[in-house]
Image: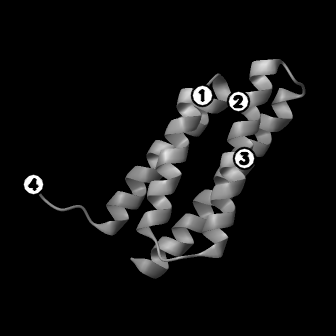
Amino acid sequence: MAQKSFAETIDERLAAIERIVASLVEDGGQEDLRDLRVLLIDVIGLLKRDPGVEASVDDLYAAARSVVVDRGVGFQPLARKQRLLRDARQRFHDRLLCAASVVG
């Protein structure tokens, strides 16, 4: 089996994170949140320490958790939290690509 390049590995992780965030925005739950956490930890392990990426990971997870918890108890406005989650995902995406280009 051919070994994947670093860029392919990062692209796969990003695609998986994109799918999970999309699911969380729609109607995801604790399982998606757990999967997101595992993927984010995996991505952090692939890179050299980067405070910007670490901060964007924290922001993305916090936004995702907020959506899941608030949906479960019926807090409003959910649309705002979903927008914050999408924004956090975009910041993470941008930071990760920047950090990966330095490493890869």
Q: Earlier in the sequence, mark 3 or mark 4?
A: 4
Q: Is residue 75 above or below residue 92?
A: above
Secondary structure category for the residue under label 3: helix
Residue type at the position of mark 2? Val
Return the mark for residue 49: none
Distance Cα–Cα, label 3 vs label 4: 37 Å
Return the mark for residue 30: 1
Secondary structure category for the residue under label 1: helix
Judge by depth and name the residue closer to the eye, 67 or 90: 67
Nearest-to-viewer mark from 1 and 4: 1
What residue does disc 2 label?
68
Of all residues, the one furthest to the left in this rendering is: 1
Distance Cα–Cα, label 1 vs label 2: 7 Å
Near mark 4 (Cα within 10 A), the count class, few <14, some 14-19 or many ≥20, is few
Q: Earlier in the sequence, mark 1 or mark 2?
A: 1
What residue does disc 4 label?
1
Judge by depth and name the residue closer to the eye, 89 or 33: 33
Q: Earlier in the sequence, mark 3 or mark 1?
A: 1
Q: Earlier in the sequence, mark 1 or mark 4?
A: 4
